[in-house]
Image (cartoon, rainbow, N blue to C red):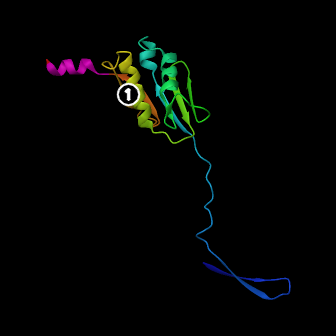
Amino acid sequence: PRLLLALDSRCQFTESFTNTHTMAPPTKAKKANVFVVDCSKPVEDKIMDISSFETFLAERIKVGGKAGALGDVVSVAADKTKVTVTSDAPMSKRYLKYLTKKFLKKHNVRDWLRVIASNKDRSVYELRYFNIADQEDEEA
């Protein structure tokens, strides 16, 4: 608590106490979480369809415990080789990796592709091929 002395209209000092702990902290503007899944390699090889991946994410992302009810909180957008998920609500990047792996398993390409965080930007996941040629060289 802090003691404040002030002059009132009759030029007399008045005392008042203020409690600095009860004051609300300034509210920060919420920053939207933006996650990107870069599917350039499988899309170029025509292994994967980017529009089906976009609809899969839109149907499966849970908001408030309900799948597919994205509302204004989460948006899923796709361009030629990338899918962008923007979320105003708290959402983990790991959840996006989980859903991507689930999509790959559903389309039977999980054995050839893996989901890796990008070296350049940590909010980006990349789909890469397993290095099968390196493993064959080690076995020989």
Residue ranking furthest to the top = 46
Number of numbered discs present? 1
Residue ranking furthest to the front = 66
Q: Is residue 46 above or below residue 7?
A: above
Q: Is residue 42 magenta?
A: no
Q: Secondary structure under badge 1?
A: strand
Measuring 80% from the left and 89% from the top, which residue is drawn there? 12
Q: Nearer the viewer, residue 73 or 69?
A: 69
Q: Circle 1 is placed at which residue position?
A: 115
Magenta stretch bounds: 130-139
Residue ranking furthest to the left = 140
Say left or right for 135 vs 10: left
Measuring 30% from the left and 22% from the top, which residue is drawn there? 130
State the predominant SS element of the stretch in magenta: helix
Measuring 54% from the left and 18% from the top, which residue is drawn there? 80
- Residue 99's x, y, as percent? 42, 28
Find residue 72 and report its image quarter.
Answer: top right
Q: Amino acid at mark 1?
A: Val
Q: Nearer the viewer, residue 136 or 112?
A: 112
- Residue 54's x, y, as percent? 51, 21
Mark 1, Cα crowd under 10 Å, few <14 / some 14-19 / many 20+, is many
Specify the quadrant that holds the C terminus.
Answer: top left
Q: Is residue 140 above or below residue 26?
A: above
Say left or right for 56 vs 109: right
